[in-house]
Image: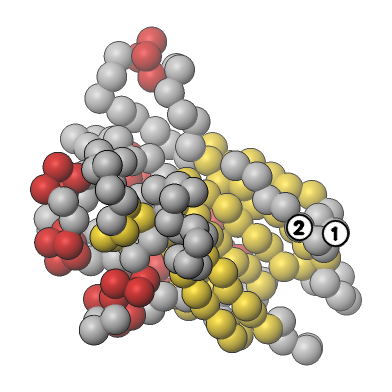
Amino acid sequence: MCTFSKYKIKQATRYQLPSALNVSKIVQRYKYKRAILAAELPINNGKYLYVLNTHFSAFAQGTDTASRQAKMTYDLFNNLQNNKQLGIIAGDFNQLSNPVLRRYINKEDQYYYSKEKTPLAPYFSSFQAAQSLNQTMGKYKKTHFTASSTLQKNKKFNRNIDYFFLTRRLTLKKFAVLKKGNTTLSDHLPMMIEVKIPNK
């Protein structure tokens, strides 16, 4: 993971996420080391904007890895909010906002997502979501789809597993999934938000 910024980054901290895959301990050592990258951007009066970047595991079915990664990340970000800090977290969470959305995914990929619950539920109730739960499930949900299957030759963006969450003191001004001209670059679409930092 990497965070580029036109603004000064005072420091960045890498937090190792828990990971347990259905592989041997030897093979596990060579798998991806999922993490959170937290950058501190000075704003004014000794305050900071905390920008967190993460990528949850996609292949941990049959383990508690998804829930453990989601809880650790939630606790870290919620601590910022409880301390009245300004924070944004973004990334590939590899989870649907609601299991009902499995119906829009090709059958080969439905296996990767729970039929019963999502570990992201507390995020939507505790933080500002750039794509609200209603938007990810409502009439225009397809405009919020951010990812496609890696198993299909013709990319069809049919799920939302990438999100922005903000602490409550920030004001979300704009959000967009940048689809035009970007559908052949990756199995994920770029996203953009514009936020306002409070004056005080």
Q: Is residue 97 above or below residue 84?
A: above
Q: The N terminus lies in which quarter of the figure?
A: top right
Dot 1 amino acid type: Lys
- Helix, strand or loop under label 2: loop
**Circle nearer the viewer, 1 or 2:** 2
Asked whether residue 169 is in view, the answer is no
Q: Considering the numbered disc 1 on the image, is that residue within a helix, a strand or a loop?
A: loop
Residue 48 at least partly seen = yes
Where in the figure is residue 11, as x and y percent of width and height? 79, 49
At 25% from the left and 76% from the top, the residue drawn is 137
Q: Residue drawn at (65%, 45%), measured in percent from left and top?
A: 2
From the viewer's side, name the closer residue of 94 and 17: 94
User: Cα distance, mark 1 to mark 2?
Assistant: 7 Å
State the mark number for residue 179: none
- Residue for point 28% across, 19% down: 23
Determine whether, in the image, residue 31 is placed left or right of residue 37. Answer: left
Give the quadrant of residue 20: top left
Foreground: 122 or 138? 138
